[in-house]
Image: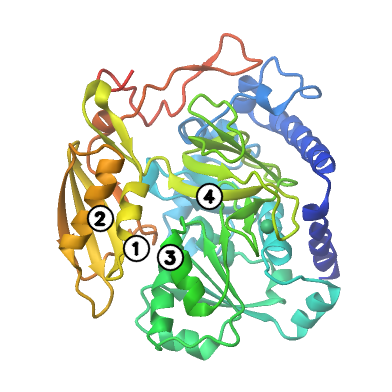
Amino acid sequence: MLLFLLRTLNLKRGPRLAPERLAQIQQQRLKALVRRTIRGSAFYREKYRGIDCNRFTLGDLPPTNKGELMANFDRVVTDPAVTRAGIERFIDVPENAGHHFLDRYVVSHTSGSQGQPMLIVQDQRSLELAFRLQMTRGNNEPVGVREGISRLIDPVRLAVVTLKRGFYPSATLFQHMPAAARRYVNVLWLSQTDPDLNRRLNDFRPQVLTGYAGVLEMLALEAEAGRLRLEPELRQVVNNSEALTDRAKARIQSAFGLHVMNNYATGECTFLSNGCPTDAGAHVNSDWAIMEVVDDEYRPVPDGRPGQKVLITNLANGVQPFIRYEVGDVVTMADTPCHCGSRLPRIARIEGRAADVFWVGEGSRHRRMINLVFAHAFEYLRDVREWQAIQRDRHRVVVRLEPLRGATVDLTRARKALDRELTTYDFQDVQVEFEVVPQLAADPATGKFRRMISLVSDQAKAGPPQRPLIGRGMIGQAIEPRRTHRPTPTNATRG
Ligand SMILES: [Zn+2]
């Protein structure tokens, strides 16, 4: 118990460390991880052949991706007792949720909305780290020894509004809260579809409220309507992993009078960052994780500019190594110091999945239509609660609008707003139909709401051709990103 508290408080030093010292710690942990990985994983041993594990830089390690790690699952993990078939059998039994796999691992899977699901195995160490980081760096008020001890007596009331139990990474995390952490936190677990949600929250009086951005926004509207009353106890609102739009942020902040802490993480690295208490975005926990913002060809993108994807390295998880693991999120790093005083790198903006784009137009006229086209049009309309765009074919998009309760959507205004954006971004050849629906629902499988859904087949919506890459230090060995689940585009791409 005391050890947990001391180890936890030790993490408070990270944000104050000089960047050089932080880089040193990161490099030491990376070396240790690579050494362990080469010893225990046949897949990485082969992939890193020719790399001197005592003298390398991060860029020498060829990137990897979901397709590659899933296709070679049993050779990737460092514990031979862990197999893909074994995990699949385990998660096929719903009653296993909340239990350990092989008595020592926590398993989860990502949603299938971005292609095939990824199976994730975490050891106890990385799971505890996620909680300890949340307790020390994910708070908008400082946690000291005194605060730690007072919470032992009067634990923080945390309401988690998410899916029901299951094997989704965020659900898994709370189901496996370490016993030591439970002493500090009293968790109420609620489903976003619970018809009694407002009453149960009102009774519980949470001090911390956490959920996906879409759910928090819905709760903000309930608070504005007077059906949800969480003041004055509520002191922190945390968005977990769903892209937070400017509109949602403004709504949540005005309803609860609190800054929204915007965590950004992935199932592969649940402790990647913690929301900044003063500014937009989140600080990367770069003593325990590495995040590189890169372009389509894995070249680093400077701070202040959006990348095409990110490469994530989890420095804590030894059983299933994720080293320079590709995630298709469009992320911009801040290029100015942060008001909160943390010296950890700050993610300024997350545009969500790069996969959440429409490819419109033909042949060499293939262009990427990003969510800002719609967001700019609809997020400032006062009668619209939420929007969703569905690409039916390359030139046809259906926009579904959900009105605010009691409001009527002014479709002429909505169309005008969108036309303006389509002209600005030069998408006049795209036909748009509008539908007003009473309620837009989250994807039932994941609980996450998707604003952009393309029904155009992979082949037709494929972006620019993915050139085979030569990893530095791996001369002659090409790595093709996403080979297993993304067909190589043929002629319908821009060159
Ligand atoms: Zn900050």
| Amino acid found under the numbered disc labelled 2 | Ala
Labels 4, 1: front one = 1
Give me the residue at 31% from left, 70% from top: 382
Residue 282: percent from left, percent from top? 61, 55
Q: Which residue is mark 4?
A: 349
| Amino acid found under the numbered disc labelled 1 | Tyr
Q: CA distance from mark 2 to mark 3?
A: 19 Å
Give me the residue at 62% from left, 78% from top: 235
Q: Are marks 2 and 3 in contact (CB under 8 Å)?
A: no
Q: Which residue is mark 1?
A: 380
Q: Crowding at label 2, few (<14), some or many (≥20) Cα neighbours within 10 Å?
A: some
Horizontal side of 279 relative to 309 (left or right) equals right
Residue 37: percent from left, percent from top? 69, 32
Labels 2, 3: front one = 2
Q: Which residue is mark 2?
A: 417
Q: Is residue 9 above or below residue 54?
A: below
Q: Crowding at label 4, few (<14), some or many (≥20) Cα neighbours within 10 Å?
A: many
**Sequence-wise, which precedes: disc 2 or disc 1?**
1
